[in-house]
Amino acid sequence: MTNIQLISDNALCTACGACCGICNSGAISMVTNAAGFLLAEVDESICTSCGKCLRICPGNPDITPAMNSRDIFHGKCLSGYIGHALNPHIRQKSQSGGIVTALLCYLLERKLVEGTVINTFNKDNNRPRAVLASSVEEIINGQGSLYAQSSVVKTILENQDKNIAAVVLGCQAESLQHLAKVRGNGLPSYVIGLFCSGQYSGKYIDEILHISGCKKEQVTGFRFKDKDAGGWPGNLKIYSSGKDYVLNQSIRHRLKKVYENYRCLLCYNQMNIYSDIAVGDPWGVDKFDNLKGNTVVIARTEKGEALIADAVRDNIISVEEIPAGQIIDGQTVDGRLKTRFFTAMQVTGNKGLMQPYDIKKFNGIAYRKPSMLKRLEIKRQLDYTRRIYRIKSIHMVNFLIRSRKLELMLNKLVIKMVRPFLKILKLTA
């Protein structure tokens, strides 16, 4: 490989935008393919084959991820917490407990950073957009996760001359780690990582808007999880210039397997192991006020741990210490995630497909073998997501989407009918 085009062609691009931000010749741009996924595209006519893009790409199998703990799926855990922002407005408007927003505002107000890189909803195209927020108002307006892709690391590199904090996904944090090895400077002072179970095509948002009946040009805001709509974890909510629309969260879950990114099925870094602190929803951690919103937090560096302690001292957040292992268990890392990752790597390896990691680097990590039914499910999802990512015809993409919806609906009906017999035959858990 001389550049990252082969990585994009094999559907292994995470769309982090690091390659675009580091390319001195301007040969790399971020484009949207027929299936609605962001990916890096190389203009071979001006590419100098310097190889910088390959040295920082989290989809490049020749780069070894850092093993900073005995189990790379867990990462280094200094401490674990559950809590929320003490500002009631921030807590209510957040996806979970508002700790990320509270910490970003805290850093900015105390001039510990000049700005924060966050995702916002771009009303011009109804897509996420990574921006540098330089005011508390901008940070608060950017609350909530947007599961479609944006090139966060590209925006970070565009502001590398500033002292900033950044909110990133695991793959984006991994590219920042590679950048640190290559450049050694220009990286965020604080990296706040989100737990991530996958990214999705922008068509995911389009489909939800279509179901709601809201006209695209009237959309003013979009939330995948809004606590104003039923409490945590929240239903879908679309804000418009007319009326607001609320859709049951079951719609979001039903469409996940239609718009999921192939590369995300081959990811181990759900828990964001390269961040200063990693945060997420409080799954598996029962607290009486979870409905109002709580955040679980793992401090991964001393800097991250100090930030939490300072914010508690200054009455910005309230947290209770809990075992980090309890947080990891709640995110079903040792069960669902490891089973999916190792199965996906085996399936793609058997087919001779390009993979983002050398599986030998994961030797010695135990995982739960999938049932026959689960293996078939993972294999089918890999086949579908890779195919739809690589097809260039919009008409064919739309045909595959319709076919996949029908297949998933029929599968659900069949599994419901035959599951009792499969349990008897021990073909499924």
Image (cartoon, rainbow, N blue to C red):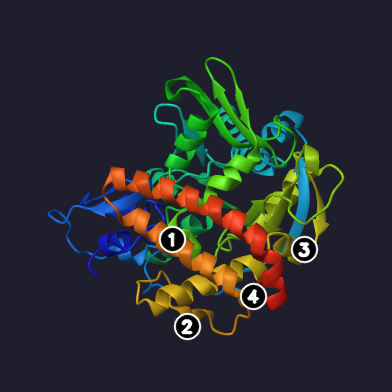
Q: Earlier in the sequence, mark 3 or mark 4?
A: 3
Q: Earlier in the sequence, mark 2 or mark 1?
A: 1
Q: Please name which of the two marks, 2 or 1, marks the residue nearer to the observer.
A: 1
State the residue lying farthest toward the left. 45
* Mark seen at residue 427: 4
Q: Please name which of the two marks, 3 or 1, marks the residue nearer to the observer.
A: 1
Callout 1: SS: helix
The percent position of residue 41, horizontal first and vertical second, equals 26, 52
Counting other residues with Cα less than 10 Å from the Cα at mark 3, is it few (<14), some (14-19), or many (20 or more)?
some
Q: CA distance from mark 3 to mark 1?
A: 27 Å
The percent position of residue 142, horizontal first and vertical second, equals 56, 34
Can you say which quadrant of the picture contains the C terminus?
bottom right
Callout 3: SS: helix
* Mark seen at residue 360: 2
Counting other residues with Cα less than 10 Å from the Cα at mark 1, is it few (<14), some (14-19), or many (20 or more)?
many
Q: CA distance from mark 4 to mark 2?
A: 28 Å
Q: Identify which amino acid the numbered label 3 is placed on.
A: Gln
| Residue 94 visible, this orientation | yes
Which residue is label 1 attached to? Answer: 263
Q: CA distance from mark 2 to mark 1?
A: 19 Å
Q: Earlier in the sequence, mark 3 or mark 1?
A: 1
Q: Identify which amino acid the numbered label 4 is placed on.
A: Leu
The percent position of residue 29, horizontal first and vertical second, equals 27, 47
Callout 2: SS: helix
- 136 shown above or below 60: above
Q: Earlier in the sequence, mark 4 or mark 2?
A: 2
Which residue is label 3 attached to? Answer: 326
Q: CA distance from mark 2 to mark 3?
A: 28 Å
Q: Residue at x 58, y 29 (%)?
A: 141
The percent position of residue 385, horizontal first and vertical second, equals 42, 57
